[in-house]
Amino acid sequence: MEFLFVYGLFLAKAITIVVAVVVVVGFIIGVAVKQKQSSASGNLEFESLSEHFDDIKSQAQHVLLDKDELKKFEKEEKQKQKKKSSKKDEDKKNNMFVLHFNGSMNAQEVEQLREEITAILCVATKDDEVLVNVESGGGVVHGYGLGASQLQRIKDKQIKLTVSVDKVAASGGYMMACVADHIISAPFAIIGSIGVIAQLPNFNKVLKKNDIEFEQHTAGDFKRTLTMFGENTDEGRNKFKEEIEDVHVMFKGFVKQHRPELDIDKVATGEYWYGQRAKELNLVDELKTSDDFLMDANNTYRLFHIKYATKKTLAQKLGFSAYQAIEQTFMRLVDAGNKLYR
């Protein structure tokens, strides 16, 4: 009897836990579905980089200066502020708007970029400037082509556009960068790769080996040139390569249009170069990090960083948390495995 009592108690607890988990999961799924059905909204975030630089300078002075030096410094700063406030409107600094574009393979970040550029064009004047920090190894042609077109909108309004590359702007990344009036690059940033690549596996032999038939029906001689599951032909391969070459010709023409001083046949080989060599080849105009550029610009511009941030749904947040948990667990297992073999 005692066994049955203990077992019944255990079973009741187990059922209670299961029901609670089902209710929680059901609630989460319901909320996630509702959020998915509603359109994802976003908002523009403005940050004064000039104030950020001033705060850094002030913090450093408070640490490094003694009491007398600090008192003198604060007095000089107050005098500078008085002079600034007494100046006429025509002496007011112009604005520099700073954007960060960290592009993925499918260039989905262009959606945020277009919102940021639209916001800038609503308030910027011809005396302002835009700095876009580009970081991307490239990706789909249509995505990065749209990204380049978004940057062209700035130039079409006769606003100066500068692109900085701290790490990498290759292939589609360079397609965007070359639109700028001025390109700056860190000495060891990766630049160039003016080329086109397309690749896909073919499983036709595997299917044949396992007696699996694959059918594909098209209308038009070249509706499908290469396929992953069917048997590819030389005719299809030649047409596929012809299409790639056509894209490469357009890519070269686009770069040449924006940087006419380039020896396009010399640099459009699909190779990439580090910043120092890229400058020698006229792929970039100046060797400098974006940090140094902004510190110098702070003397003549009011700097503002603009970011369009979208609100993550509950499903996205949970998915990211789950991903982090899985990643951490995996790294612990790897670390434990390494310890066993030490």
Image: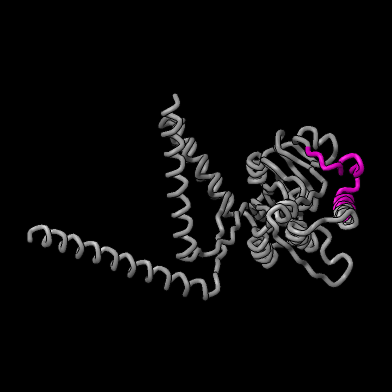
Q: Residue at x 70, y 60 (%)?
A: 212
Q: Residue at x 76, y 53 (%)?
A: 176
Which percent across, then down, holds residue 4?
12, 61
Which percent across, then down, holds residue 221?
89, 67
Give the position of the C terminus as an image quadrant. Answer: top left
**Which SS type dominates the magenta stretch?**
helix
Q: Toward the viewer: 9 or 52?
A: 9
Residue 260 magenta: yes
Which percent across, then down, holds residue 10?
18, 60
Q: Is residue 42 visible?
A: yes
The relative height of residue 215 versus residue 301 in the rendered view (above or below) is: below
Give the position of the N terminus as an image quadrant. Answer: bottom left
The stretch of residues the image draws in magenta is 246-272
Count up the numbered dots. Answer: 0
Q: Residue furthest top?
A: 342
Q: Is residue 329 left or right of residue 275?
A: left
Which percent across, then down, holds residue 259?
87, 48
Q: Is residue 148 visible?
A: no
Q: Is residue 335 left or right of residue 138?
A: left
